[in-house]
Amino acid sequence: MAQTQIASDFYSVEDYLALEAQATERSEYYNGEIFTMAGGTPNHNQISLNISSELHHALKKKDFRVYMADVKLWVPQRNSFLYPDVLVIKGEPELHDNSKDILLNPLAVIEVLSDSTKDYDRNGKFEQYRSLDSLQEYILVSQDKAHIEYFKKTAPHEWVFKEIDGMDALLELTTVEVALEIADIYDKVEFEQ
């Protein structure tokens, strides 16, 4: 989803949370700046729904929870609030200042790439997410072709990278012991020719 900075003013965390509580559209916060988020494409929405549905089904009755789109994630080391497309936590949610919608403990974060945000998702956002001790897997999913970029933490400050291509492949999330078929991730997604 595209982001647009809403003003050049500095906003405190408290300012952002107060504005966000009244807002009719979502915005992310990074170190005093607020960025509005544009709506996603049908492909973006379908992929996010497919992934969250597949994960929810696979993790049913296990000690994991799957969230999508409207739950914020607080990254204290980078002074930012982000909206991952899909995230998985283990156990009970850890919440920011007793909020009901701001998580602190993602195990896996999945972002569906948009043309306008793919560089930010690969670099800026990933740099922020990596500062979270709980995060073990970061997955970037193309909406233009059957292509996934998979990052797994192997030790503090060490990540391995793997590309996954084609509808016959599998995305294996090792931290939750789930393998998703790429064809299921892209079910009902229409790629432009």
Image: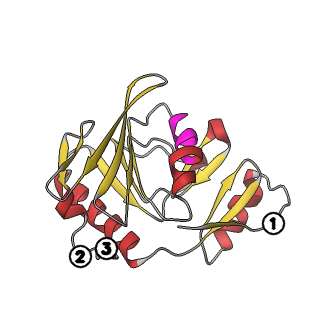
Q: Residue at x 24, y 62 (%)?
A: 185
34 left or right of 52? right
Above/below status of 65 relative to 173: below
Q: Secondary structure at mark 3?
A: loop
Position of residue 139 in the picture relative to residue 57 (left or right): right
Residue that carries the numbered disc 2 in the rendered image: 188
Of residues 192 and 160, which is closer to you in this image?
A: 192
Query: Residue 7 shows which numbered tag?
Result: 1
- The nearer-to-camera label among 2 and 1 is 2
Q: Position of residue 120 (x, y in %)?
A: 57, 52
| Residue at x 58% of width, y 41% of height | 128
* Location of residue 96 in the rendering, given as x and y in whole percent from the top left corner: 57, 47
> Where's the C terminus, which quadrant?
bottom left
Q: Amino acid at mark 1?
A: Ala
> Does any portion of residue 157 appear in the rendered image?
yes
Determine crowd level at label 1: few under 14, some 14-19, many 20+ residues with C-alpha closer than 10 A: few
Predominant SS along the magenta part: helix
Question: Where does residue 26 sit, x and y in percent of width and height?
Answer: 59, 69
The amino acid at mark 2 is Lys
Magenta region includes residue 52: no
Q: Which amino acid is tagged 3?
A: Phe
Q: Which residues are magenta?
A: 125-131
Q: Which residue is mark 3?
A: 191
Quarter assignment of residue 141: bottom left
* Label 3 – label 1 distance at C-alpha: 35 Å
Q: Is 186 left or right of 136, judged from the image as shown?
A: left
Q: CA distance from mark 2 to mark 1?
A: 38 Å
- The one nearer the camera, 104 or 178, is 178
Looking at the image, is mark 2 or mark 3 nearer the viewer? 3
Between discs 2 and 1, the one toward the N terminus: 1
